[in-house]
Image (spheres, helix red, strand yellow):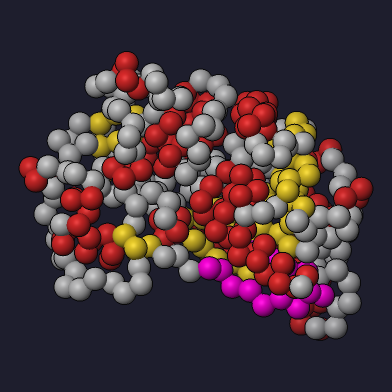
Amino acid sequence: MKSIELFAGAGGLGIGTQLAGFEPQRVVEWDKWCCETLRKHSTTAQTPWNIVESDVRQIQFKDLEGQIDLVSGGPPCQPFSLGGKHNGQNDTRDMFPEAVRAVRQVKPRAFIFENVRGLTRSTFASYFEYIKLQMTFPTIVRKTKEDWINHLSRLENHKTKGRYRGLQYNVVTRVLNAANYGVPQRRERVFFVGFRDDLAIEWHFPEGEYSKEALDWSKASGEYWEQLSVPKSQRELGKNQPMTAPIGKKPWRTVRAALQGLPDPEKHPRLAKKHLDHRFQPGARSYPGHTGSPLDEPSKTLKAGVHGVPGGENMLRRPDGSIRYFSVRESARLQTFPDDFALHGAWSEAMRQLGNAVPVDLAQIIASDIHDHLGRHLE
C-alpha cells in the first residue's frame, strides 16, 4: 500500500507507517536540518524515500489522486502547545488547513494526523471540532473572506443534514499515552484517524498493552529489579503497591530498560563514542519544574525546547539525585528510533527534532492496525 508523509520532521511517524507496510511515495518537510536527517535515513531504508524539501503550502498533490492509500503527518504543534504562545488558529504555523487540502486532493483511503494534547483544551474546543469536521468533509472548502466560525457553521449544517454525497471520511480522535504502547516515555498526544466513508470500515484505536499498575507490581514482586540486574541497594521501595498483578498488561517500559547496553556518556566517554550520536552534553541544572526523568519510570515527555534549549524533561535523574542531559542516542531510544538512525545537526538541533517526533513504535502500532483493516477491505 502507498502513502505520503507531510510535515515529516525527523521521520518518526513516517518510519512507523513504513514498518507497518506502507510504501512512502512522497515525504514533505521544509526544515533543512530535518531533511538532512531524512536523507541519511533514506540511504539505509529498504525503500528509498522521495524527500521533498519544501513548504507544504507550495505543493500540489492532485497528481496523486486515487493512487494513495494513506496520508499521514504531524502539523506543527506550536500553535497549540502548552509551552507556546497559544495563538491556535490565529498562528501562521497552523497547518491543519494544508493537511485537509492534501486529503481533498489525494482522496486517500485513510489518514493519520498527530498533534499535542494542548489542542484538546477547552480554549480550543470549537477549533478542535472545526478541524475534525474539515477532515470529515474536506471538499466543503472555506470561501473567500469567510471566517472560520462561519465555515464551522456550514460544516455543522452538513453534518446534521446527513445527506452529503461528496468526499467524506469517518473520523475518530483520541489522546494516547505512548507509555501504554510500550514506549519508555509518558507522552500524551492527540491523533486523528479517518477512513473514507465509501469503504464502510469500522475502526477504533488499538488499546495499549502496557500499564503503570503492571510496572508497580513488577517492582513490588522484585521481578523488575531482577530482570535489569539492579543491586538491592539501588532498589526503590514503592508506595501503595498493588496487591495483585494486573491481568493482561505488561509493565510500562522505563528509562533504565530503554538505555540498557549504552554506557553512561559522562562516566565512560570513551565507551560511549562507540555508539552513534552518544556524547555527553554538559550544562544540566536542576531547579523547580526542571528536575529530570527518574531512571526507573518512563521518561517525562521529551520536548523540542525553547530557543534551542531543551527543558528538564530532557535530563536523566539518577537514584543518587545527580542529573545530566540525555544524549541524542538516549533520546532516540526514548522515542523508539532504531539505533542506526542518525540525526543531523548539533546536540540542540538533534534534540529539537526528537522532541517534535512521533515515537516510532506508537506510529507503527496505529498504522499497522489501519493497514490490516484496509487489507481486509481489499480481500
307 vs 335: above or below: above
Q: Residue at x 61, y 49 (%)?
A: 19
Q: Which residue is drawn at 56% across and 68% down?
A: 205
Residue 285's quadrant in the figure? top left
Residue 358 visible, this orientation: yes
Q: What quarter of the picture does the C terminus occupy? A: bottom right
163 vs 156: above or below: below
Q: Which of 282 and 333 is in front in this view?
A: 333
Residue 85 visible, this orientation: no
Query: Among all residues in the image, which is located at the extreme left?
Result: 233
Image spot of residue 268 (x, y percent): 27, 20
Q: What stretch is highlighted in magenta?
A: 193-206
Q: Which residue is drawn at 20% across and 31% down?
A: 322
Residue 11's quadrant in the figure? top right
Drawn side of residue 291 relative to residue 90, left or right: left
Image spot of residue 211 (x, y percent): 34, 63
Q: Residue at x 64, y 45 (%)?
A: 14
Q: What quarter of the picture does the N terminus occupy? A: bottom right
Q: Which of 89 and 325 is in front in this view?
A: 325
